[in-house]
């Protein structure tokens, strides 16, 4: 007798598919926006990112990502956003990022 029958394999597959649909559906139905979990590739998050630019004389100023093309202004990943901010503001020598108020890193322009 085989270890796993065709019928048992079918029920097991159906159970896995049901879980894969039910868990995200319950999460989306029971949470308030912005949600951290959905089927979307780019998911909104409650994490607050802020960018600060530093000039050659050492002065720093807050940078606004609203001028950046979408999706970079809403999705904060890798070195893309700092590179775009450096290109948009030529007097900067570095861009730093904070996550929920805590400094993360600084990237030279």
Image (cartoon, helix red, strand yellow):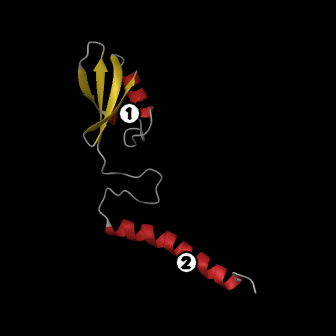
Q: In which quadrant of the rendered view does residue 96 lie?
A: top left
Q: Residue furthest right?
A: 1
Relative height, residue 52 to residue 16 (above, below): above
Q: Which mark is residue 6?
A: none
Q: Give the residue drawn at x 30%, y 25%.
A: 53
Q: In the picture provided, is 42 more to the left or to the right than 33?
A: right
- Name the side, left or right, on which 10 lies relative to 55: right
Per the rendering, the mark at residue 68 is 1
| Quadrant the N terminus occupies | bottom right
Sequence-wise, the earlier of marks 1 and 2 is: 2
Instruction: Name the spot of residue 82 as percent of width and height, x first.
Output: 39, 29
Q: Position of residue 108 (x, y in %)?
A: 39, 22
Query: Does residue 85 appear to the left or right of 5 in the view shown?
Result: left
Identify the residue position indicated by label 2 in the image.
15
Instruction: State which mark lies toward you, 1 or 2.
Output: 2
Res. 89 visible in picture: no
Extreme residue in the top direction: 57
Residue 14: which quarter of the image? bottom right
Residue 74 shows in this picture: yes
Spatial CA distance of label 1 from label 2 is 44 Å
Q: Pick whichever, 67 or 37, lies toward us.
A: 37
């Amino acid at each position: 007798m085989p270890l796993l029958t065709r019928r048992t394999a079918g029920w097991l597959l159906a159970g896995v598919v049901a879980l894969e649909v039910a868990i995200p559906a319950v999460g989306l139905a029971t949470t308030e926006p912005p949600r951290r979990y959905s089927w979307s590739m780019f998911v909104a998050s409650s994490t607050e990112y802020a960018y600060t630019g530093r000039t050659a004389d050492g002065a720093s100023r807050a940078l606004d990502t609203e001028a950046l093309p979408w999706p970079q202004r809403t999705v904060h990943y890798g070195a893309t956003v700092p590179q775009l901010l450096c290109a948009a503001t030529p007097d900067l020598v570095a861009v730093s990022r904070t996550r929920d108020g805590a400094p993360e890193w600084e990237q030279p322009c």
